[in-house]
Image: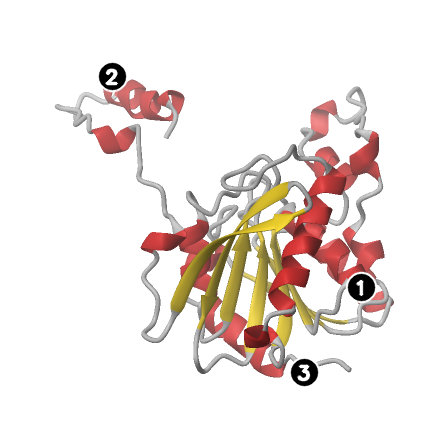
Amino acid sequence: MSCSRFLLPIALCAIQSACAHLDVKLANFMTPDQSARNATLPAGYVVENRIISHGSQSIGVTYARHPGSQSTIFFCGGDVFHRSVEGGEALAALALNADVVLFDYPGYGDTTGAPSTESILDTATAVYDYIFNLDTAAAKKRVLYGFSLGGMVAAHLAQDRRADGLVLEATPPTVAQWAKSRIPMALKPVVKVRIESQLAGINSVAALEQFPGKLLILASRADEIVPARLSFAMERRLKRARRDVRLVEFPDRRHGTIVRSPAYAATLRNFLEHVRPLP
C-alpha cells in the first residue's frame, strides 16, 4: 500500500468529526508476498520450483501437478508478475485439478536477462517447450492463460505452439488501444499516443484469427486498468473471424480480482471440461 493511499483516510477523518481515532498498523504499509510456496492447494498437489537453463539465461518456473489432472494451464502473468509475490494467488485460483505452470519474465524474480518484447516471448516459448516435453505433460490438454498484458504473450505464443484452449483475462487487443483508453475523453483531441516500435506490432486479435482451439475472454466493467469495452471489441472481431470464442463478464471486479469472484472457479472448470485436444 502506498503512503498516498494511506493518507486519504487521515484526510477524511480530519473532515468528519465523528472520527475519534485512527489506528496505524504495519499492515497499512506492508503486506506479505503471496508466494507459490505458501499457496494452499487441494490435497494431492505436488509443487516444484525449478530453475531451468535457456542458452545463457536462467528461468524461474513453478510446476504444480495433480494426479487426476487432464489439463496443463500455462500461465502468463501481467507486466509486474513475480512468482514470489503474486504466484500464490494465481496458483490457488488455477489449481482446479489441473496442472499449473508459472514463470518469471526476464529481469524479474529468478529469471535473468532484460525485459523486451523479443526476450519475453522467447522466455515464454522456452518454458513452454520445457514443460510440454516432460512425460508428465505429454498426454494432457494444453491451455494457455494470459492475464492483462500477459494475455498478449499467450496470444502470440499460441501462433507458434499448440494450444487446445486459451483464456484471456482483462487483455487489450493492442497496446495502442490500451494506451488510448487511458486518456480522458476531454484530452483525446490534444494527446497523441506514441508507441515504442517493439510494442506497436503486438496485436492479440491478429495473432488469434486462425487459432483452432477454444477461446475464453474474462472481463469486468469495473476494471479500471483495461476497460471491458476492449474485451468486447476483441470478442466481436474473433467471432467475425469464426473463432470458437466466449466472453464471460464478472460484475464489480477491479483489475486483477476476477479470480476472487465466487463464479470464477465454476467458469474456468466448465471451460476446461469443454476443451478438446487438437491433432
User: Residue at label 2?
Assistant: 14
Question: Would you call the spot at circle 3 few (<14 residues within 10 Å), some (14-19), or many (20 or more)?
Answer: few
Q: Judging from the image, what secondary structure is the residue with disc 2 in?
A: helix
User: Residue at label 3?
Assistant: 276
Badge 2 or badge 3: first in the primary sequence: 2
Figure quadrant of the C terminus: bottom right
Badge 3 or badge 1: first in the primary sequence: 1
Badge 1 or badge 2: first in the primary sequence: 2
**Structural distance between the alpha carbons of marks 2 and 3:** 59 Å
**Structural distance between the alpha carbons of marks 3 and 1:** 19 Å
31 is higher (above) or lower (below) than 254: above
Q: Judging from the image, what secondary structure is the residue with disc 3 in?
A: loop
Residue 171 at what x, y percent from top left?
66, 51
* Quadrant assignment, res 234: bottom right
Is residue 10 rendered to the left or right of residue 170?
Answer: left
Q: Nearer the viewer, mark 3 or mark 1?
A: 3
Question: Would you call the spot at circle 2 few (<14 residues within 10 Å), some (14-19), or many (20 or more)?
Answer: few
Q: Residue at x 39, y 21 (%)?
A: 4
User: Residue at label 1?
Assistant: 238
Q: Residue at x 74, y 74 (%)?
A: 213
Figure quadrant of the N terminus: top left
Near-viewer residue (239 or 142): 142
Q: Is residue 92 visible?
A: yes
Q: Judging from the image, what secondary structure is the residue with disc 1 in?
A: helix
Residue 136 at what x, y percent from top left?
54, 75
84 is higher (above) or lower (below) than 219: above
Q: Is residue 267 visible?
A: no
